[in-house]
Amino acid sequence: MDAGELRVTDAGAVVAAEIEKAVRATPGVRSVYRSGSLISNLLRAGAAALGGRPEDEPLVSVAPVGDGIAVEVSIGVESDARSADALRAVHAAVDAVLETRGLRPDSITLTVVHVQSAEAAPAG
């Protein structure tokens, strides 16, 4: 698959879902949050409410950029994990998924948006 093929929403959603799964399995990652600005997230939520986009779409953003792929991932890390270590591991996980699919990263933007203690975690 090349970057141009990701212009098809379903193909991009599949890659995003694979990346999300790999990120969730990364040591130190407690959760994955929807990537993007507050405005884009509100627009996405509105579109989903109107039936324009599925509620269960991947939280990871994947978009073709030139000959490569731009990936955005926002994570929550466990309080006993070092954020820098978690980010390096997540970057490696994203790279591995893209490499498996034959995709070249144009950019990988990772953000730690929350550090969560085990006591604060929801039961479950």
Image (cartoon, helix red, strand yellow):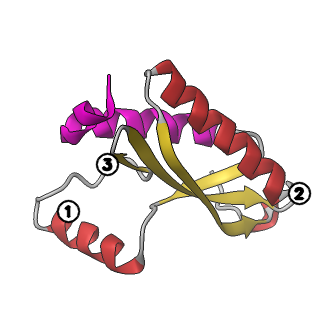
Secondary structure type for disc 3: loop
Q: State the separation of the CA atoms marked 2 and 1.
A: 35 Å
What residue is pinned by disc 2?
Answer: 80
Left/right of residue 87 with respect to residue 95 in the rendered view:
right
User: Which residues make up the magenta segment?
Assistant: 1-25
Quarter of the rendering occupied by the N terminus? top left
Residue closer to the observer: 30 or 38: 38
Give the mark, 2 or 1, whose residue is nearer the N terminus. 1
Q: State the separation of the CA atoms marked 3 and 1.
A: 9 Å
What residue is pinned by disc 1?
Answer: 48
Spot occupied by residue 96 in the image (x, y as percentages of width and height): 59, 27
Give the mark, 2 or 3, whose residue is nearer the N terminus. 3
Q: What is the crowding at mark 1: few (fewer than 14 residues within 10 Å), some, or many (at least 20)?
A: some
Q: Amino acid at mark 2?
A: Asp
Disc 2 + disc 3, Cβ < 8 Å: no
Q: Is residue 95 above or below residue 73?
A: above
Give the mark, 3 or 1, whose residue is nearer the N terminus. 1
Residue closer to the observer: 7 or 77: 7
What residue is pinned by disc 3?
Answer: 57
Left/right of residue 52 with respect to residue 84 in the rendered view:
left
Left/right of residue 95 with respect to residue 98 in the rendered view:
right
Secondary structure type for disc 2: loop
Q: Residue at x 49, y 30 (%)?
A: 98
The stretch drawn in magenta includes residue 23:
yes
Q: Amino acid at mark 3?
A: Glu
Residue closer to the observer: 72 or 53: 72
Q: Amino acid at mark 1?
A: Ala
Q: What is the crowding at mark 3: few (fewer than 14 residues within 10 Å), some, or many (at least 20)?
A: some
Disc 2 + disc 1, Cβ < 8 Å: no
Residue closer to the observer: 101 or 32: 101
Q: Is residue 34 above or below residue 56?
A: below
Give residue 9's quadrant in the image: top left
